Structure formats: C-alpha cells, structure tokens
Image: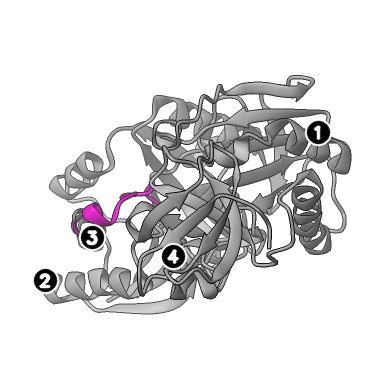
Amino acid sequence: MPDLPRVVLKPRRAQPFFYRHPWVFDGAIHKVEGDPKVGDEALLVTDKGDPVARGLFNATSNIKLRLYTWNLDQPLDDAFFAERIDHAIRLRESLCPSWSESSAGRFVFSEGDGISGLTVDRYGDWLSVQFTSAALATRKDAILAHLQQRLSAKGIVLRSEKGMNEAEGLDAIDGPAVGAEPPRPVFVEEHGLRYGVDLLEGQKTGFFLDQRRNRLAAARYATGRVLDVFCYSGGFGLTALHTGGAKQVIGVDVSETAVTLANENAKLNGLDSKTAYIAKPAFEALEEFAAAGEKFDTIILDPPKMTRSRHTVDKALKGYYSLNKLAVDLLPPGGILVTCSCSGLVSREDFEQVLATVVMRTGRAIQILEARRQSPDHPASISCPETDYLKCYICRVT
C-alpha cells in the first residue's frame, strides 16, 4: 500500500467513488491525514480505512480530491498523464483520420477522458489548453511539453474559464505558453464553411466544437426566416443558410465582439447579403420582436451555461422557461425550435419539463424531432454523469 496522505470519507459516502466518480467534495470528507499541499497525491479511503483510489489534492477547491486511478499501485507521475493523454488522442485520430491545417476538434475532454481538469482543443497545428484544476496544473509544464511533442503543435495557448481561477486558487494567465503565437484569426472549416477563430480572446477555447454535429442536424430542418439567438460566431445560422433551407438569418448576441465575428464569418463565406446581426441581450431582443409582431420560421436558442451551482438550478430553469416561451410565441404553427442547454447540472428530465411547462402555459404543442448530445470528440463518462452536459432538442411547434 502506498505511503500517501489519506483523505478519509464520512460513513456511507463511499459508493460513488467505487463507481469511479472523480470528484470528492469537501462535504463528503471526514478528515485529512497528513499534510498534503496543492497537487500532492493522496489516497482516498472509506471511514473504515479501506482504500478506494488515488488522486490529487487541493485544499482551496470545493473539490478537495480529484481521482485519476483505481489502481492503488499506480503513481500519478508524468508517465501516467502522458499515457492518459495519448489514450484520448488515439480516439480523436480514429474519429478524424484525415487531419489538416483547417481541421478543429477537442482532443482531451477532462473527466470524459479520465483527466479531470484538463481540456485540449486542436485547431490545425495550434492547441488551446485549459486547466480547471489547480492540482493538475502543478504538472502543467510536463503536460504541455508532451502535448506539443505528441501533436507536433506549432504553439500552445493557455485559456482560463470564468470564475474557475478563484474557485481553484489558480494563478493562471491567458496567452501563448509554448512555441509560436498563433495567427489572429486561425481559419478552420466545418460543413463546407470557413470560420475565423481567435485563440487568444475568443469565448471558451475559441470555438464551440461541441455543437458541430448539432449545427448540421438543425440545418436539415431550418426553413425560411431564421432567428439565431446567442449566435456567437454565427455557426448555427450560417450552416442553416449553407446546407439547409434557410433564406435569411438574423443573429442576436449580447457581445459586440461576437457580432463582429459573426459578420466577418458571413462575409468570409459570401452569405452577408442574407444575414443581419444585432448586439443586444437575448431577452430584450425577443421581447422587442414580439412587440413588433415579428414571426420567424426557425428559432435557435443556444445560451451559455446558466448555472454552475446546485443552489441556482431553480433560477436557471426559470430562465430556460422564459427564453423558450418567448421563442415559441414568435413561431408560426409548424415552426422549428432548436433549443439547447449546456448546463451540466440541468438534467434532460428537467429540461424536458421546462418545455412541457411552455406547452401548458402557451397552449402550443411541441413535438421533439431529435434529442441530441455533444459531438463524439466530447465523450461522456458513464461514471461522471456531469460529462453528458449538452442537450440539443430539435422541435416542431404547432
């Protein structure tokens, strides 16, 4: 048995970890034996002292211990994380065997790949990397060096997630970390369209890769006049114009930067004569369209995460309800609603109940044509339900 600091669970709190859930929250812990520092290995044990798994410790985070291996003799050294990263990369190489300088994909998906706290997106020869665990970030130099060597990356950019630095005690600085600085923008292709991606200042790691297949699926149903709400760089609407039956797209985003980016992408693909983008809060825009008597044949709702805490799930559900009710009121009978939630704490059942409440209060019927998830380069772990986070419902409203 390894001689490591021990994190001792409270009675009757061990079951999720035998099922390999990777997060040990503060509320499940009885005591910590030893004096582990941020990033130190620790052994998780039951209240009776039975060993469960090995992880990395962080006293600052509410996730005190992130678990990585249930092989009690396996040290969490550089070789371990290199092999875990290689395992993730092999999946992506099988999903996209013909990689090019304009390809884009997620190559490491944190808990989905058994590497809690690490996200790696690849844009051609450039990598955008995000650490959401201060404990894992203590291995940053070795991880970045391995990623550059394994993927022959020209350069690696570090990105941080809003609020995560404070929650984890991360002293992370966004910007180039290894190799050359990427061009601004980097150009990628998706479904026959080109997009400019800003790896240094774009949202998340630069582009919403998880919606790739959903953008194409939604385009198959899109018709006529399309309203793309929370449009960001324009992906849903432009795909609807390029491959679907859309004739005109109006995009709405609160960010002036996003609206500029969407306009640039429309021009890049020769679709600017069929698009108009508005910088305005989504709820305000929807209410103004309703007051003006506007109608749309297709409405796409792809809001950012509405909750990061279980304490605010009810508030998020109310937000989803209001958003979807406003959209339904703008659709004629037979209109298409594409509605999404990327809030991992909002279950599919909860989201469907939101739509059922919209039906009850509007008197309109909603038929689900497709219920979709994130793209396969964002694999969900059966041991960590939170990784199955993206919900995309393509619906017909009558």
Q: Position of residue 93 (x, y in %)?
A: 83, 58
Amino acid at the residue labelled 4: Lys
Q: Are marks 4 and 2 in contact (CB under 8 Å)?
A: no
> Disc 4 to disc 2, how far (Cα)?
22 Å
Screen quadrant of the C terminus: bottom left
Residue with the mark numbered 2: 361
SS for callout 1: helix
Q: Earlier in the sequence, mark 3 or mark 2?
A: 3
Residue in the foreground of this view, choosing between 317 and 49: 49
Residue in the foreground of this view, choosing between 245 and 15: 15
Report the magenta residues as a range. Answer: 302-314
Q: Position of residue 397 (x, y in %)?
A: 30, 73
Residue with the mark numbered 1: 145
Amino acid at the residue labelled 3: Leu
Measured along the vertical axis of the image, is residue 129 above or below residue 76? above
Amino acid at the residue labelled 1: Ala
SS for callout 4: strand
Q: Earlier in the sequence, mark 4 or mark 1?
A: 1
SS for callout 2: helix
Mark 3 neighbour density, 10 Å: few (under 14) some (14–19) many (20 or more): some
Which residue is painted at 36% across and 52% down in the image? 26
- Closer to viewer: mark 1 or mark 2: 1
Residue with the mark numbered 3: 317
Residue with the mark numbered 4: 391
